[in-house]
Image (spheres, rainbow, N blue to C red):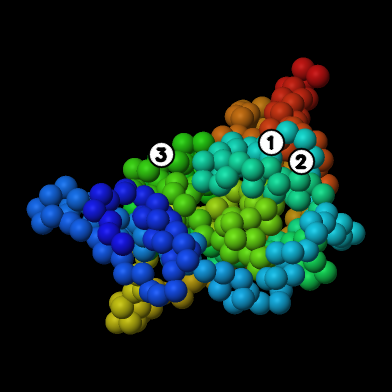
Amino acid sequence: MFHFDRWWNPAVENQATDRAFRIGQWRDVQVHTLLCVGTFEDALDPRIQRKRALAESIVGTSEAWITELGTEELRALFALRRTPRRPTNGIKAQTQRGTFGQTWWASRWVAALERLVDPGRLSRGRSYARSGQVLKLEVGPSGVEALVQGSRPTPYKVTIRFQQLSDAAWERVIEALAAQAISAARLLSGEMPQDIEPRFTAAGASLFPAVGAELGSACSCPDWANPCKHVAAVHELLGERFNADPFLLFTLRGRTKEQIAAALRVRRAGVAVAEPAPEAVERTAEAVSPPAEAPSLPLAPATFWTTSADLDAVTFSFEPPALDALPVKCRGRPSFWQSKRDFATVMEQAYRAISAHARALAAGEA
């Protein structure tokens, strides 16, 4: 058998060859391909061979692949599709309707997922997250560990790894953040500034995953797709964790909230993080004289609650704080908060109203 007019599709040539074997042949069929050196067919032949090798590596040339499947893989392949088991102690998403991002940083996380993950997988993941299929969710510097209940008795183990920034990249990020007084003040007070993404970009880094290589995931389920619906469910619940604590983004990128705050204080103070030399410590200790003994005050109970100053000359000023609801923002959103409104925004309004009423009381206007 001779192939002298090449087909671009190697499957067509294979089909013609197989047909020659099936037409009553009792002996081997010799197949030859005729090419003229230097012609278009000669240049096309290597591409056809690469295409054939790629197809064989994916599909295979026989049914041997099914005999190499394990028992669990065969069971998953031929078992009837069932709905997932509904656990009673799962972590149900607080967002039962609409989007999962209640804060701007959680919305940016959801936007990154919609850009990097298949929409169908995300939709299934939201359904899993809302029905409480996630049994455990732990977030730490090494990544995310979770257990997700599927249709099998044993929950699937899900791991998510963020690409951590290098030490040099973090140094550039901290320098960029420290250069902006307002951004640094908000971070030090436990608040995520809205202009933080441009600071990361200026330092040649990104806070949220920009490409798929920055967000790795794995699941023990038999689904070949990655991320699967179990990973997508963890992704959605992770967005709710970011709602309550945006600094988990820093942790997953390689720095904790405390490390960022300490580095910013050092930059803002203009001092270097370095241990003083031992001889310098000794000279300083020698130069410091012991503190003088404080003088004793006379016992005068009758005049203890009096003052010699003229209180009418004392002036007071009431200035609004630079950041409202600072204690609340440092603690984060409580677990009992079920409203769709942002907890920090509600508390800011309450703090402003309380401050205004307190100033009115102090001034005798209330």
Q: Position of residue 59 (x, y in %)?
A: 49, 62
- Label 3 to label 1, Cα distance in Å? 24 Å
Please state which of the two labelled residues, at mark 3 or mark 2, is closer to the viewer: 2
Three-letter amino acid code of the residue under disc 3: Pro
Secondary structure beneath label 1: loop
The residue tagged 1 is: 99
Residue 333 visible, this angle: no
Q: Position of residue 258 (x, y in %)?
A: 54, 60
- Label 2 to label 1, Cα distance in Å? 7 Å
Q: Residue furthest left?
A: 38
Q: Quadrant of residue 164?
A: bottom left
Three-letter amino acid code of the residue under disc 1: Thr
Q: Sequence-wise, which precedes: disc 3 or disc 2?
A: 2
The residue tagged 2 is: 95
How many tags in the picture?
A: 3
Residue 146, placed above or below residue 94: below
Q: Residue furthest top?
A: 365
Q: Quadrant of the N terminus?
A: bottom left
Q: Position of residue 68 (x, y in %)?
A: 59, 77
Q: Position of residue 365 (x, y in %)?
A: 77, 17
Question: In the image shown, does 182 or 41 lie closer to the viewer?
Answer: 41
Q: Which mark is residue 198?
A: 3
Three-letter amino acid code of the residue under disc 2: Thr
Question: In the image shown, does 72 or 99 lie closer to the viewer?
Answer: 72
Query: Contact, CB < 8 Å: mark 2 with mark 1?
Result: yes
Please state which of the two labelled residues, at mark 3 or mark 1, is closer to the viewer: 1
Secondary structure beneath label 2: loop
